[in-house]
Image (cartoon, rainbow, N blue to C red):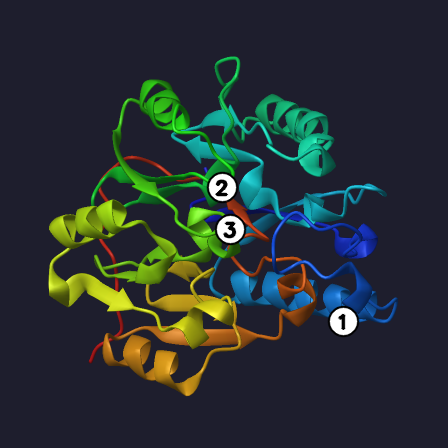
Amino acid sequence: MDPRPLFLMTDPSCFEVSYQINPWMQPTAWRPEDLVTAQRASSQLRAALQSAGARIETVGAVRGLPDLVFPANAAVVLDGKVLLARFRHPERQGEEAIFRSVFARLKARGLVDEIIDLPDGTLQEGAGDAIWDADRGQFWVGFGPRSSRSSVAAIRRAFGREVVALELASDRFYHLDTCFCPLAGGAVLYYPDAFTADAQAVIRERLPRAQRIEASAEEAQAFCVNAVNLDAEVIMARAPASLKAKLQADGYRLTEIDLDPFILSGGAAYCMTLRLDRTSQPHHAILAAE
């Protein structure tokens, strides 16, 4: 078995911002030349992942489904189990059949083991709202703007792992992955104002102060919390100097990519990937020496 981390990405050749289902999306700001920039940015993200030791599976582009470039929303994947997403907005519901076919092919190749459907009436938008924390052996699950509260119990039943529910407070941070990022070694980068007061209390209760890296509004709006982390490496959109200092002080190395075309649609590095090989086995992080 290949031990390298395995990610799903999507060919961005049909990407555009043609509708609005979150406050970041500005169809009138999209220009045809932005597609060239988007393709270059996607290639750079792919190269950064591969440089960090990952391998990539690619989903083909589908015209009319521009947000297919955000496969983090396709499913929750752990221990070879795939819990397929169900989207709230009609604009994205066409992705469901595409990703079902993708996972069926991956299962036939032995890259995943089991495909699970959500209960009827439950909305859940994949790993964007269900983030596995390898150091704690639990899911952090967001609900509110996109995923329904009932998704919390559905994830617990599907995977048999502890689930910590966090209610999101803002349509601007509509998925958990836009405002919450567990990092190797036990730290968590997050934007407090994206959460309700109750959810903020849960985070403070669960995470000692030394493990909480709080993003500022500027850092969150730059989509830097929407990052991919592999041991000491953090791959993200271009970061303000303030965030670089916070992460480097904790021993992390940053790879920054100009993801502006995708931020026009409300997504960045984490949204553009889906980790397929996550396991509930204990994880021991390797951080850079301080």
Extreme residue in the right direction: 32
Mark 2 to mark 1 CA distance (whole Å): 29 Å
209 vs 148: above or below: below
Mark 3 to mark 2 CA distance (whole Å): 6 Å
At label 1, counting other C-alpha atoms closer than 10 Å, the crowd grade (few under 14, some 14-19, many 20 or more) is some
SS at badge 3? helix
Give, as a three-letter code, the residue at label 2. Answer: Pro
Evaluate if marks 1 and 3 touch, with contact meaning CB atoms under 8 Å apart: no
Q: Which mark is residue 37?
A: 1
126 vs 251: above or below: above
Classify residue 187 as left or right of residue 270. Answer: left
Give, as a three-letter code, the residue at label 1. Answer: Thr
SS at badge 2? loop
SS at badge 1? helix
Q: Residue at left 54%, top 60%?
A: 269
Residue 213 picture quarter: bottom left
Give, as a three-letter code, the residue at label 3. Answer: Asp
Which residue is nearer to you in this view: 2 or 120?
Answer: 120
Q: Is residue 264 visible?
A: yes
Q: Which mark is residue 171?
A: 3
Give how far across and how far down residue 126 sits, in percent. 50, 36
At label 2, counting other C-alpha atoms closer than 10 Å, the crowd grade (few under 14, some 14-19, many 20 or more) is some
Which residue is nearer to you in this view: 151 or 70?
Answer: 151
Q: Which mark is residue 219?
A: none
Q: Earlier in the sequence, mark 3 or mark 2?
A: 2
Q: Residue at left 12%, top 49%?
A: 205
Mark 1 vs mark 3: give the one in front.
3
Q: Is residue 190 visible?
A: no
Give how far across and how far down residue 24 sits, in percent. 62, 60
Which residue is nearer to you in this view: 51 or 96?
Answer: 96
